[in-house]
């Protein structure tokens, strides 16, 4: 289990690299990369003091592999989840026939009408299995897992990409591709 301080640092880094680079005085390049030295300096200014070795530990030990280093390890970025404009350079990929989305009951009336929208992120995030989707939904309350007819969507021309840690991204999911999964929500 990571010490509390590293968990706190990890959350701060996620916020900076995905949503708010200004907060740490950072500039992200178009692919979302920031200088490791600048990140550590920015963290220090925000009183989240971290050594390079501890940063390595945060990146390697992160439960969902949220961050990655460049090949020369001088730059770092979030693998997904941005609200700031970045081009992660992910190639289009053919999704499995079914992907899953974990949400909560209170969003279903809107989702049923509008489908899944990226909300504050750049893409809708989909999970390859119901266990992961259940965890994603449970962040907000009693989880409801929706099945997404990803194969059919792809054949209909919707572009999918997959991140290095197995999260599937798509611009939106129209309601006709959604259905409930047994036991977690409306059928
Ligand atoms: C919902 C975490 C109303 C959607 C997780 C979700 C994931 C709608 C929320 C990753 C809607 C957006 C992404 C509509 C979608 N009307 N609500 N039309 N369409 N929603 O956090 O998928 O820890 O942006 O169901 O584990 O929950 O950050 O997306 O509940 O992998 O690495 O609007 O974030 O990863 O919430 O989570 P989010 P998400 P990290």
Image (tube, helix red, strand yellow):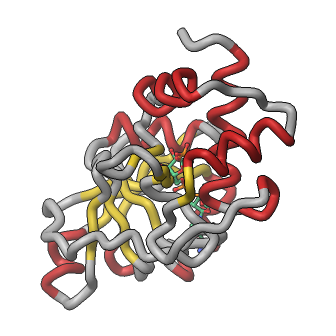
Residue 4's image quarter? top right
The reply, left or right, for residue 174 in relation to residue 118 is left
- In the picture shown, does residue 17 fall above or below 183? below
Residue 55's image quarter? top right
Image location (x, y in percent) of residue 120:
66, 69
Image location (x, y in percent) of residue 182:
34, 44
Between 160 and 69, the one nearer to me in the picture: 69
Q: Residue at x 79, y 36 (%)?
A: 44
The reply, left or right, for residue 76 in relation to residue 38 is left
Residue sticking out furthest to the bottom: 157
Image location (x, y in percent) of residue 31:
44, 71
Residue 83's image quarter? bottom right
Between 149 and 79, the one nearer to me in the picture: 79
Image location (x, y in percent) of residue 161:
27, 69
Q: How many marks?
A: 0
Q: Residue at x 85, y 40 (%)?
A: 46
- In the picture shown, does residue 36 fall above or below 59? below
In which quadrant is the C terminus drawn? bottom left
- In the picture shown, does residue 183 fall above or below 51? below
- In the picture shown, does residue 151 fall above or below 72? below
The reply, left or right, for residue 53 in relation to residue 37 is left
- The quadrant of the rendered image in which ligand 1 is seen is bottom right
Q: Residue at x 31, y 57 (%)?
A: 163
Between 165 and 49, the one nearer to me in the picture: 49
Q: Residue at x 47, y 55 (%)?
A: 186
């Amino acid at each position: 289990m990571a010490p509390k301080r590293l968990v706190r640092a990890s959350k701060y880094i996620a916020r900076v690299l995905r949503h708010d680079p200004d907060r740490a005085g950072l500039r992200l390049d178009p692919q979302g990369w920031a200088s490791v030295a600048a990140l550590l300096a920015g963290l220090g200014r925000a009183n989240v003091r971290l050594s390079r070795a501890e940063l390595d530990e945060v990146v390697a030990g992160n439960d969902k592999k949220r961050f990655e280093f460049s090949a020369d390890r001088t730059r770092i970025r979030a693998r997904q989840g941005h609200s700031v404009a970045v081009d992660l350079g992910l190639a289009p990929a053919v999704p499995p026939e079914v992907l899953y989305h974990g949400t909560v009951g209170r969003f279903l009336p809107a989702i049923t009408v509008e489908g899944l929208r990226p909300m504050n992120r750049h893409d809708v995030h989909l999970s390859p299995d119901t266990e992961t989707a259940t965890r994603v939904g449970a962040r907000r309350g009693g989880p409801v897992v929706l099945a997404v007819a990803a194969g059919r969507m792809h054949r209909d021309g919707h572009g999918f990409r997959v991140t290095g840690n197995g999260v599937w991204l798509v611009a939106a999911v129209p309601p006709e591709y959604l259905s409930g999964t047994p036991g977690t929500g409306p059928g």
